[in-house]
Image (cartoon, helix red, strand yellow):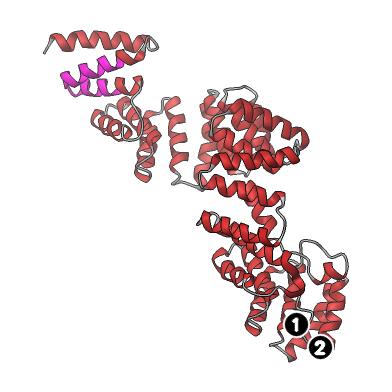
Amino acid sequence: MLRFALFVLLIAPVAGFAQDAAQSSDSQAPAAVPAASQTVSEAVADAEASMAKSDWKTAEAKLAPWLAAHPADARALFDAGYVADAQSRLDDAVGLYRRAVEANPQSFEAHISLGLALARQGKLGDARPELVAATTLDPGDAGAATKARAWRALAEIDRNTDATTASNDLLEALKLTPETPADTLLAADIAELTGQHEAAESAYRRILAKDPKSAAASSGLAHLLIAQKQYPEAETLLRAALEQTPEDTALTAQLATVLAAQDKAEALPLIQKLHVAHPEDTAISRMLAEVLAQAGDAAGSDQLYIRLLAASPDDPTLLVGHGQNLTRQQKFVEAFAVFDKATRLDPANADGWSGLAFAASRTNQSSITLHALTMRSKYLPEVPSTYFLWATAYDTLHDKADAAAYYHHFLDSSAGKFPNQEWQARQRIILLENKK
């Protein structure tokens, strides 16, 4: 959530002509203004006067006939792109900005506006070269602050593919304009992505020291604390943040995660409330499914997993959750099929192999139980329950030595926590070792 919010902030269009001349609609204008030194026709000047008043329809009416007669007028093309941008006609704006770039490849304004518009379309690969081009050009009247926007947008684009480049992009922006809280958040995010958790935490805490009400910094710091399993501190932080913004979905979801991790009863009603408010949010639905399962409502949890799987039938994590609920409901044949599919899709899914081993055991498929346990052991250490599965599978296959050995392993690790299975293990050891 934090990363998405930062990206939206950095790629959102910035008012140009209209904001310089008057109070423009803040989020529906392009990134920069054309160079004042550029020769401008009377028709284009009249259109720009209307743009300064945010009279987009009039400006468009004046630009259309001019462009019909002068299709390569770079300034008029940029103005027309600006007008389309201001009216949220993003496809039209991109086309006009692109024509403006073609008409004048040295136009800083056209390059940065095209880059930011493409980024808003999600075409980051196309956006990047336009923004890079903008950083090499003179911003003119648009000023250093607008050029810094190009560097910041590049930092956002680069951070998930090359964090070092993203850091350098941000440093270039800071050479042009002072650091802002958004810069600190971006720096913290980049540090987190590169595993520099201490640097990220320090950045988030610096922001909160200056602005304790910063929801973005609270969310970022909470994310780090949750990853480090520092749940009590994360809970305190999130509760304080939610006092300031009680309807913040991201913070509420994080608090629910923290409460669930601490097995606090408050987690379930909180997630249920979130789910009612956001029934189509798959992340919240997944969280609710997990908490319902932990609370013992396997059937209720499974209803959610089934709906999620309808949209994503090959998601191994969803399949494992569904399989675990089927196991809890003692539907072992169905569970076996689900775990088998999950492990085929994701052979490194240890929980899938655990589930398959148990379901295979309950459906008398001992060889598959042993295979699943072997695969699981590549990713997770043995626990009493897996020792017992090893033992019973070998026992069923009449491998007395291995069965006895694993029954011993089970007894050594169970520490009285599984009295029924421990009694069974002792009885089987007596029989197996007496029959060597």
Is the residue under label 2 in contact with that under label 1 (CB below 8 Å)?
yes
Q: Give the vertical position of 15 relative to 212 (above or below).
A: below
Please tell me the numbered disc located at residue 366: none
**Tag on residue 76?**
1
Residue 409 part of the magenta segment: yes
Q: Quadrant of residue 246?
A: top right
Asked where in the image residue 175 lies, by quadrant, the reply is bottom right
Dot 1 or dot 2, earlier in sequence: 2
Secondary structure mostly seen in the magenta stretch: helix
Q: Residues within 10 Å of mark 2 (few under 14, many from 20)?
A: few
What's the mark number on residue 41?
2
| Mark 1 residue crowding within 10 angstroms, few (<14) / some (14–19) / many (20+) | many
**Image position, residue 343 (x, y; %):** 36, 40
Q: Is residue 103 visible?
A: yes
- Looking at the image, the residue that sits furthest to the bottom is 69
User: Where does the magenta region start and end?
Assistant: 389-410
